Image (tube, grey):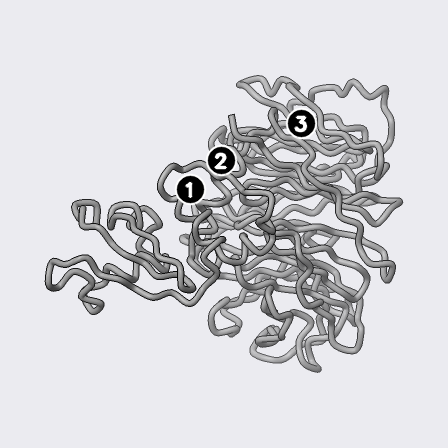
Amino acid sequence: MESQKDRVKLNVGGKKFETTATTLAGAGRNSFFGAMFDENWNLHSDGSITELFIDRNPDYFGVLLDLLRTGELYIPPKIDKKHLYREALYYGIEDHLRLAKWGPFDGNRLRLAKSITGPTVGKADKIRASPNSWCCVVRDNMVNVYNWMLEEQPTITTRDYRRVNDVCWVDSDNIAVSSSDKYLASGGIGLFSASTGELKYNFQVKDEDQLKDYTADALGVSSDYKLFSSCTECTNKKNGIGVWDQVTGKQTDFLPYWPDSKATKFQWLHGTNCLMVSSCHLRSKCSINLFDFRENTVALSWSDATYQRMYRDAIAIEERNSICIVDSNENLGFMDLRSTTSSIEWRSSTRDNTFNRYPKLAFQEGQLFSLFCDTISVYCGSDWVPTSQLQQSRGGLIRDFSIGGDRLFALHWNKDIFDVWETPRP
């Protein structure tokens, strides 16, 4: 594709454009323009300048063609931004538009781009970011989905209006939703289309080859198309972890989970193909287990039997071979990911022992993020030094946050508002 220098004529909605094959090839092989160079099109079969008619708006096409030519995005005043984004989606060059608008993700350079006010129905509880900078917000029995233009998509609603327990982006197009519905009926977990809100199929659980009366809670996914869910049997409160194939929806395993409380978080470790399962509850001891699916063994098992701290979240940082834990006073602790006898090295908070019910951790692009009250702190370097803070007074306390693609989303507690943080271009 890069060696083609022939000129190409395009007729877009009656307006003619002339460019080169090299410029169009820069859109990528999977784009609309990449398809033009497929051998079946025979675009340059006779060596002449070929004119191709495209039935789209020429004004928006001109802006996108200049983007492919220069890598810079200039939007004239008469151009509607949201319509331009839709045109970029049609041509398959939305990634070019995002790169031109935002810089690479950097927690120390994030700026508040927009605040979105949600619907008046339902109390916002969780927010999850997708790999392509979409997000979804859990409100009681509903999941409101927002695309990367921050336009609300059709609402996902659970069966019989059951409360949503957790949501998880399976990929850029699909969302798994767990609810308080029971598996025996039609499944407490459903796979939904992010763009249409339609239910694709339900996941049911079997234990000892029989359907069991379980409810689903925390969700997680792996790089090899597995879906995980925390399961609790309704009668005897037995805890387990269900494993399904994301593509077929069929259950592939059921792992008994021995800690006293159910799993609250799953994290797939790509480097070791292990699943980290953590249980961090307000009034019970914390436990962290690492399941090695290659050997079908437990590679690490740790729990705090002292009840001296209220652990609220844990996250594995593979590139540092460590696990970070945060308690209700925003004290950060670190333990060795490779040791079965790991002890925690604690680092004191500067918050004067202020109690917070919902601290949370995230890790992105070599940076550690910690939520506490109304502030998200960014930590960097070998010693995890605090380098910056994200704070927006309008929404008050932050209930949850999530990072995906090039954005950080922060959901506020008292007001149904979520903030969108982006890294500006250098």
Neighbourhood count class around disc 3 (C-alpha, 10 Å): few under 14, some 14–19, many 20 upward: some
Q: Is residue 114 above or below residue 156?
A: above
Give amino acid for label 3: Gly
Secondary structure under tag 3 reads strand
Above or below: residue 28 compared with residue 372:
below
**Residue at 43 percent of width and 50 percent of height:** 62
Lateral position of residue 55 relative to residue 118, left or right? left
User: Mark 2 highlights which residue?
Assistant: 318
Please rate how many residues cluster around mark 2, counting C-alpha atoms within 10 Å: few if below 14, some from 14 to 19, many from 20.
Answer: some
Q: In the figure, residue 378 lies in which quadrant?
A: top right
* Residue 393 tag number: none
Amino acid beneath label 2: Glu
The Cα–Cα distance between marks 1 and 2, rounded to whole angstroms, is 7 Å
Asked if marks 2 and 3 touch (Cβ < 8 Å), the reply is no
Query: Which residue has dot 3 on it?
Result: 333
SS of the residue under disc 2? helix
Q: Which residue is mark 1?
A: 271
Earlier sequence position, callout 3 versus callout 1? 1
Secondary structure beneath dot 1 equals: loop
Q: How far across and down, in percent of the image, does residue 151 sit?
A: 66, 56
